Amino acid sequence: MNRRALLAATGMAAAAALAGCSDGAPGDGDGAAEPTDTPTDDPTETPPTEPNGSLPEGSPSSPTERLRELVAGNAGFALDLHDRLVADEDADNVFVSPYSVSMALAMTYAGAAGSAEAAMRETLGFSLGEETHPAFAELQGELDDRATTDAGPGGGSGDDEDDEIDAFRLDVANALWGDAGYPFAADYLDLVDEHYGGGFNEADFATDHEAERERINEWVADATDQRIEELIPENGLSSSTVLVLTNAIYFMAGWEQEFDPDDTADATFTALDGTGSTVPMMSQNLRTDYADLPGAQAIELPYVGGEVSMVLVVPDEGEFESVEAQLSGPTLFGVFEALGDASGDLRMPRFEYEFDAELSEALEDLGMAAAFGPGADFSNMVETGGGPGIDDVFHEAFVSVDEEGTEAAAATAVDMIESAPAESFDLTLDRPFLFCIRDRPTDAVLFFGRVVDAGSAQG
């Protein structure tokens, strides 16, 4: 049996972001694979191989031009961020939600101006400018429509052909946590509320930033069904924090074609470094969309309802780094377009893991440095002055894949601090000085003294 009929998932990079949702059932792809050893009802021709052996390129299939531009920009940013994260020497399994990161930063971008606005627009792929915000609202509306899908005749809980079932659960929540006395511009808060549903919560970071951190983390945990419990680490915020922008996303869906647990058996998975480990390998024979690509295979596994799917890209042995390096927005869409009707045997491991990262360094390396720290221009966020600057971006994600389907969750928090330049100083204690040791919360003076001759005070 050739490899089109026997897909052993011994190495995979799951490209299953919601930006790559399929709009149709298996067999609706623009391209197709060659017929497998198990014939299909209507086999189609194999897409032509790229002459240089590289992955094909494509474009998103979103229903409107505005959505196509937003999705294309988001996918480009997603692969740029992935490349940066896997470049770390200790990178192993990586999993992020580019949708969550982009949405949290889009709310931040709404207040940017000058060089900060330009840097964020370029890095995040926000080529729509001010139209970015209504575009995100439009995309969220599209995803909200997926929450209940017509199951078709006999597919619901009753006998009525009009029965509907919950195809999957997709919860997206946004919130702002801001210092009560900070001069946030009403227009900015209204824009975020209109397009992102980001309600404003008053916070007191100066008095007790740790208590506020715990409150934000509790909100994230509730929004992710307790899968993300400590998005912001201890001391992740400070008394200088004036605003935290948060996004949380939770996803759960069953496979349209579930795996039978009785067919799951232990098998060897060969890691990137060549070591082998025993893992539970799921197995089934199925008809779905598949592509035989230069140096890789790809397969699409739809979830219940058929409108959302997981796409898995499985590089040939020894080709993982080469294929991963080729992935970009256009080549990811090219993989989607190459998928076509096929049938065969699939084996893939169950897996579950978490991934977390502080994204500030990665984002600065990608070109967003102008949006960070003192002096960043977020003047559109405030009534007067330059506004706050980004201090850090926290992200955490979880994924679990088994015989029944997929559970995934992610959250992002953007910590912003007062960005007015601090008073500068250049001080050398080379003359007599006074000093004390105090308790800062109460100002109780515990010790007081003076040094008039440092030479005689050397122990």
Image (spheres, rainbow, N blue to C red):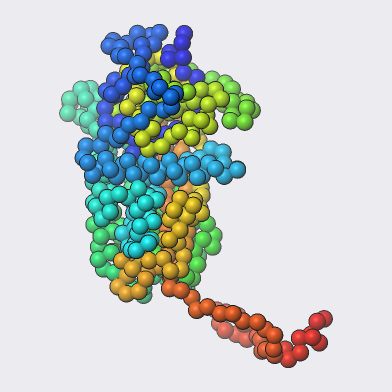
Q: Position of residue 62 (x, y in %)?
A: 25, 37
Q: Is residue 434 left or right of residue 297?
A: right
- Residue 111: image quadrant is bottom left
Classify 393 as above or below 72. Answer: below
- Residue 4: image quadrant is top left
Image quadrant containing the C terminus? bottom right
- Residue at left 40%, top 22%? 51
Classify 264 as above or below 388. Answer: above
Q: Position of residue 117 (x, y in %)?
A: 35, 59
- Residue at left 41%, top 43%? 78
Determine if residue 261 is in view.
Answer: no
Q: Position of residue 303 (x, y in %)?
A: 34, 29
Classify 212 as above or below 347. Answer: below
- Residue at left 24%, top 27%? 151
- Residue at left 37%, top 69%? 387
Q: Is residue 456 left or right of residue 305?
A: right
Q: Is residue 336 left or right of residue 195?
A: right
- Residue 254: image quadrant is top left
Q: Is residue 319 left or right of residue 54?
A: right
